[in-house]
Amino acid sequence: MSAAAGSNEELRRGLQESLDPRVARTRTGIAAAVHQLSDAGGELSVAAIARAAGISRASFYAHYASLDELADTLRRDAFLAIADLYQNDERPDAMRASQDRLVAHFAGNRALYAAVGALPVTKEGYLAGVRAMAAVIEEALLEHPARPAELAPEPTARYIVGAAYGLLDAWIAGEIVLEEEALADHLTRLLPSWFSGIR
């Protein structure tokens, strides 16, 4: 790793931990630019996102090493928000509501995830998404009253997420054509019944 690459990583780490409102505004502006370009069907590249956000490419790279990293951050934040809502949702259809939110997130960021999926090196980005989702599911499984005792939370979470993320990835790529509601229905009904609560 070059000295410049190392210093960029240190800068990004510092910005991720920063409480400075300017940092939050820049990151919010980058996310808003992604949504704006996605809604307009525009090109999703670092240059296009930086232009739409009103920042330089250098500023983008100060916050994110790549489009992959930006996508990973948006995914992780969405999964944490969805998990938090699910864990505090007492309604019987909480699982379905969380799947609706998950599909809405992927639909709202479809152009970004498609652009990242078209990059030459995508395995790490794909695995990062699986890991981020699995961490959220694993936490839910730790205290799940209906989880069979012989099923350890970590491999169970990876199995559930591997299937769900594979379906979402195929949907993003256009390999599977489903309306958003039908996709959420598949994601809910394909879960183990002891987890989803659906018989």
Image (cartoon, rainbow, N blue to C red):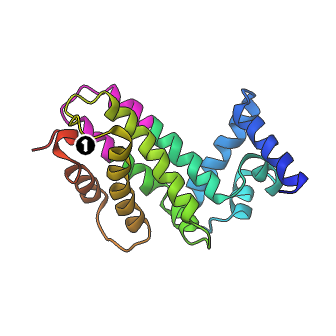
Is 83 colored magenta in this rendering?
A: yes
- Asked if residue 41 shows in the view, the reply is no
State the residue lying farthest toward the left. 199
SS for dot 1: helix
What residue sits 55% from the left and 47% below the top? 74
Is 179 colored magenta in this rendering?
A: no
Position of residue 150 in the picture relative to residue 23 (left or right): left
**Which of the two residues, 29 or 118, is positioned nearer the viewer here?**
118
What residue sits 37% from the left and 56% below the top? 162
Q: Which span of residues is magenta-colored?
A: 81-99
- In the rendered image, residue 160, in percent from the top left (x then y), is placed at 32, 50
**Which of the two residues, 143 or 167, is positioned nearer the viewer here?**
143
**Which of the two residues, 47 or 98, is positioned nearer the viewer here?**
98
What residue sits 69% from the left and 35% below the top? 24
What predominant SS class does the magenta segment belong to?
Answer: helix
Count of marks placed on residues: 1
Residue that mark 1 sits on: 96
Query: Which quadrant holds the N terminus?
Result: bottom right
